[in-house]
Amino acid sequence: TDYQDLYGYGHANGTGEIDRTVIRKNELNSLFTATYNWKITDYLVLDLLYGNELIEYKRNLLESYGTGFNFSGWNHLNNLVQYNGYETERRKRTFGNFGNLALSFQDMLFFNATLRNDVVSSMPSGSRSFTYPSVSLGWVFTELEAVKNEVLTFGKLRTSYAEVGQAGDYMESYYTTPVYGGGFSAGTPISYPANGITAYTLYGVVYDPNLKPQNTQSYELGADLSFFNDFVSLNYTFSRQNVKDQIFEVPLAGSTGTSSLMTNGGSIHTNSHEITLGFRPIKSPNINWDFAFNFTKIDNYVDELAAGVESIFLGGFTSPQVRAGIGYKFPVIYGGVYLRNDAGQIVVDENGLPQAGEDRVLGTVEADFRLGFNTSFEIHKFRLSAVLDWKQGGVMYSATDGLLDYYGVTQRSADYRKKTSFLFEEAAVKENGEPNNILISGADAQSYFSAMNDVTESMVKENSFIKVREIALSYPIWNKERLNISVNAFCRNLILWSTVKGFDPESSQGNTNMSGGFERFSLPGASSYGFGLNIKF
């Protein structure tokens, strides 16, 4: 990849700048597997697999940055008053050996075991090799003659245990060339080399030389049941995951000369329940109808962090932030609350304006539960399908409304400015403890919205929604042995009912939507409609 950002002489009344970046990536993957099948008896079958995997990754980045052209008309590095270069190189290699053993008895009892060992170059020399196993057992108990009946068509019980190792990226401490800028300055006003002098500072992240691979232990129990010849099906799975030696950055005091330590900083656990209930009320040559509900409840808890650390920053701003904190579900929104008294009542100031209190946890992002619904109806080759989702609970930082109020560009802010007076919209008390009755003048609407903008809690909202994700219709117009042609029409994100009014609660803000917790000047959710022609031969 080779690209550059170029601002010519005179751009925004400036003298121009160039930022050119060249990135080279090379990746080599090799996978070898060998399998063996042995039918020991008519009832017992053994399958063996051995595999070897090699992954090698190289990345090189070259960047040239400079500011100020001597004269206009020649936008070239050689015309810059000042420029410098930057180069990084990273190499990683993973070498893995793995095996799988599977036993089946009378197509009723199934046992599976795996073992894998990885050797990685991205960890300290004493922690580069790690091994992780898994075992599972399944029993189709309806194969027993004593259990077969007309009510229970199929029944299976299953359990499993698995470990998964995950390497981090370890680097020995190194120095970097600093640049200094900030505030509202353009570019980096101070950069080295400067006047023939080069400077180096310790990189802000140091790595623990005793860093170990992260390990995830998973336990699972489940059952698959089918009744009345597949008229009703029921699937349930409970799983627990224990993540140990989790790798993340732990904050360090500025007096150390660095900002954080990459180490094995803690552990989390996850409990999850998943239930799928399906129905097939109509099954005939010309008409088929089936539908299913899928219920999931996932709870992530932070059990332990590095010594002296109560929570860690995962994303966001100075306030609010998305964090992981001991004793809380993962992740949480952390930010400033309304100032409250000992009774928990919001306290306004002498002008009737809300006040900012301390920073604390404002709610968990994860939903209480999710419920999905899907259905398919076929009649004389026409097939109509639909998918619907319901998310219940959880909160998100929805800031667009509040920030637009703050900038005075919403109808709501205009209405407040036109009012003779208004009262703070939340139940509150005055500083003496009496109920709030202090009226705010419409001329002070800007001060009111500015005070609200200083309190993160004012923009944290409960985030439940129901969304019709897709409705689709298809019809096969030609279906022969060597040629299949079908036409279809669909619409997606058609209907939304949400407690976050006016915005799609799945809108993005930052990388991965800050774990689903942030909405800030997000783009509106879009509905899409389409027609298709599928040809298969």
Image (tube, rainbow, N blue to C red):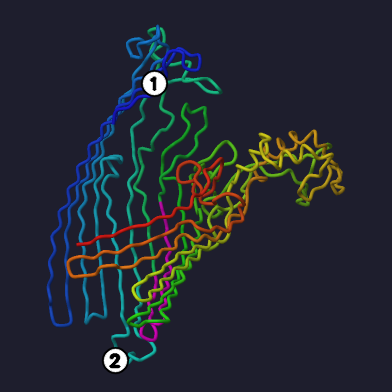
State whether residue 92 is above or below residue 49. above
- Magenta region includes residue 235: yes
State whether residue 52 is above or below residue 236. above
State whether residue 48 is above or below residue 132. below
- Give the mark nearest the N terminus, 1 or 2: 1
> Is 331 situated left or right of 101 in this image?
right
State whether residue 298 is above or below residue 416. below
- Tell me residue 500's x, y (percent): 61, 52
Numbered tag placed on residue 382 in the rendering: none
Amino acid type at image mark 2 = Glu
- Magenta region includes residue 529: no
Figure quadrant of the C terminus: bottom left
Q: Residue, x 75% and y 34% (percent of image)?
A: 447
> Is 121 situated left or right of 44 in this image?
right
Dot 2 falls on a residue whose secondary structure is: loop
Amino acid type at image mark 1 = Leu
- Tell me residue 346's x, y (percent): 76, 47
- Tell me residue 14's x, y (percent): 48, 14
Q: Residues within 10 Å of mark 1 (few under 14, many from 20)?
A: some
Q: Residue, x 34% and y 57% (percent of image)?
A: 532
Examine the image and state in which quarter residue 55 appears. top left
Front one among 187 and 181: 187
Residue that numbered label 1 is attached to: 6
Figure quadrant of the N terminus: top left
The region drawn magenta spans 221-244
Q: Residue, x 58% and y 55% (percent of image)?
A: 463
Residue that numbered label 2 is attached to: 145
Quick one: which residue is furthest to the front in this view? 477
Examine the image and state in which quarter residue 482 appears. bottom left
- Tell me residue 431's x, y (percent): 83, 42
